[in-house]
Image: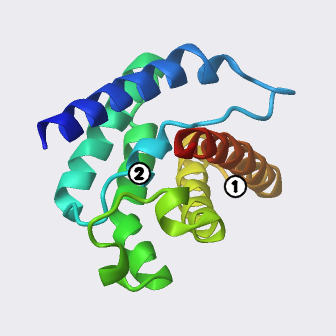
Amino acid sequence: MILTIARNTLFFVVLVLAQVLLFNNINFLGFINPYVYVLFILGLPVALNKKSIMVVAFCLGLLIDIFTNTLGIHIFASVLIAYLRNFWIDALFFRNDFDFVSPSIKNFGFFNFVKYAFVLIFVHHLALFILEVLTFNHFLLMLLRVLYNSIVSLLLIISFELIKSK
């Protein structure tokens, strides 16, 4: 139990540092900026209650907001997917099958994990970019940006998961 908490705390710190120091500095074509810190929320154990997940997501979003000098948009997007996460797991799977595991490619299988992760990443990015822009003047451009960023973030998360599972 203590080892799991220590491992998750270290993973939390590593993801925040990687996001702030590495991935926030990636701005491909002025359009793509991957947000891989959502992997922490996606990978929390299924049996963890919703309130705990939302508190962790709040703390994660707060740290990202502090380091990126944004005003709560990462908090909102992170807490939103933390809230929706268990509903999405229940919609995709029989909850009893995965009650004591953490979502991963190893535990869910490749295609199930991609379905699980892509929808939550897309919702996260959609909320994030809507709050960032606060206008629907260029809605299709924003939607395209959400889609491209979601795909790149998902590919990075899948790469990490595949490396982790070996």
Res 147 label:
none
From the top left corner, tell me how far across and down residue 115 is, in percent. 62, 69
Q: In this view, does 6 lie above or below 92?
A: above
Q: Quadrant of the N terminus?
A: top left
* Kind of residue indicated by mark 2: Gly
From the top left corner, tell me how far across and down residue 130 is, in percent. 59, 50
Q: In this view, does 50 lie above or below 155?
A: below
For the residue pair 96 and 48, the one nearer the viewer reads as 96
Farthest-out residue, right: 29
Residues under labels 2 and 1: Cα distance? 32 Å
Res 43 label:
2
Q: What element carries label 2?
A: loop
For the residue pair 53 and 69, the one nearer the viewer reads as 53
Apparent side of residue 4 relative to residue 28 in the rendered image (left or right): left
Q: What element carries label 1?
A: loop
* Kind of residue indicated by mark 1: Phe
Apparent side of residue 40 relative to residue 166 in the rendered image (left or right): left
Crowd band around label 1 with a 10 angstrom C-alpha radius: few (<14), some (14–19), many (20+)? few
From the top left corner, tell me how far across and down residue 142 is, in percent. 74, 50
Q: What residue is shown with label 1?
A: 136
Residue 133 seen in the current view: no
Residue drawn at x 87%, y 27% is 29
Q: In this view, does 60 lie above or below 122?
A: above
Farthest-out residue, top: 21
Q: Which of marks 2 and 1 is nearer the N terminus?
A: 2
From the top left corner, tell me how far across and down residue 36 is, in percent. 56, 37
Residue drawn at x 66%, y 69% is 111
Total numbered circles: 2
User: Are circles 2 and 1 on residues that touch, CB within 8 Å?
Assistant: no
Residue 106 seen in the current view: yes
